[in-house]
Image (cartoon, coloured by chain):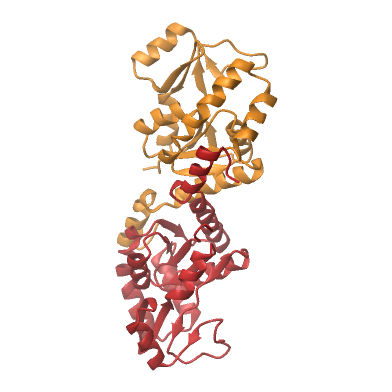
Chain colours: A orange, B red
Amino acid sequence: MARQGILIVLSGPSGTGKGTICKALLAQSTSLHYSISATTRQPRPGEVNGVNYWFIAPDEFRTMVEQNELLEWAEVYGNYYGTPRRWVADMLHSGQDVVLEIDTQGAMQIKKQFPQGVFVFIIPPSLRELEDRIVKRGADSPAVIAKRLGCVQEEIGFAPQYDYAVVNDEVAAATAKIAAIILAEKCRMDRNTDLIEAIGKRGSIE
Amino acid sequence: MARQGILIVLSGPSGTGKGTICKALLAQSTSLHYSISATTRQPRPGEVNGVNYWFIAPDEFRTMVEQNELLEWAEVYGNYYGTPRRWVADMLHSGQDVVLEIDTQGAMQIKKQFPQGVFVFIIPPSLRELEDRIVKRGADSPAVIAKRLGCVQEEIGFAPQYDYAVVNDEVAAATAKIAAIILAEKCRMDRNTDLIEAIGKRGSIE
């Protein structure tokens, strides 16, 4: 039987830089696969279906929810976002590792269904820096920024439910830490009992 | 308060290559400190007191045992070996990481006293290769080799009590995995609750 892949969930407060870290991680690894979310919102300029998101109709999204085909889903400012379950399950089953970048609410939903996932909380070096990042990103209106910052304290409250904490003070260093976490998780004893049994019984892990 | 250091225990069956991996790990890291064992055996040619071992008299060893100054100790072929507790405790307390290379019996003793340590089981790629390594090392008589191999199956039985399993099929790869384990362990949420509390309360981790 092929070894199960690992689901790595990168999460943390809005504007913490998890998207940048996720991109850097995927750029340096060919064995890591990005879980593409489904959404009902319209594509922004340059966004491609099946690359940035699966852009689907509200009806289709509703059907996926009803048939329990989403690992998690949420409504954000009138649009729906969700993680298709089957693709993630198929990848893990065939021994591929999957990385998922998601907000704290979504991560907690996924943890209920996949407690064996590896949950990484990305921490901004300071709340002031976090505010700077959200403002500089320029994607949000002042009202949305204020709302996001108000949520940060609440989001930090979820941190103790994660397996790892990585401070994003420098993207390369934070990315290296997450790569180390993935490598270490593959070595965890509870993921290698087959290997121990094999050498114990047959005297060889081949 | 300074963050506690991490105690990394490299262990596994005799001849599994843990000594080589330990040396390679120490060579590439300046922030990792090797725990030197105390022993009552005579120095071999080239061995230096305070580098390879603390060479001490049997009386002195007995006193350390009685005063609970050893994290673990054992008699091996008429000689005594042990891990001085105070040095390890002082290093960890001052935030330094300590690596300890030890057999499975010793590792299990240490686990009782330091369950927060990180226990890594080094696995030989196969029992045949393990036999080759022990023979090629040339340090042991045929009788000792036979005894060592007889113990291997028993030692593998301890593996499930370790946190991580690393196959030593290639020294550089195995060393990289252990370096990743150390980096990942520093990111574990339960070692970073102070950091989460700091950002939650003051909005900054500085």
Give the position of the C terminus of chain A as an image quadrant. bottom left
Residue A84 seen anywhere in this rendered image of the structure: yes
The foreground one among B60 and A203 is B60
Q: Decide if residue A86 is on the left or right side of residue A10.
A: left
Q: In this rendering, is residue A119 above or below A106?
A: below
> Which residue is located at x 45 percent, y 83 percent?
B38
The foreground one among A34 and B62 is B62
Which corner quadrant of the image does residue B161 belong to? bottom left
Image spot of residue A86 (x, y percent)? 41, 25
Image spot of residue A141 (x, y percent)? 63, 15
The furthest residue to the front: B202
Residue A35 seen anywhere in this rendered image of the structure: no
Image spot of residue A171 (x, y percent)? 65, 40
Q: In this rendering, is residue A98 above or below B120?
A: above
Which corner quadrant of the image does residue B121 belong to? bottom left
The foreground one among A193 and A80 is A80
Give the position of the N terminus of chain A as an image quadrant. top left
**Circle count:** 0
Q: In this rendering, is residue A15 above or below B105?
A: above
> Which residue is located at x 60 percent, y 21 percent?
A145
Image spot of residue A20 (x, y percent)? 63, 33
> Which residue is located at x 44 percent, y 43 percent?
A163
Q: In this rendering, is residue B14 above or below A79?
A: below
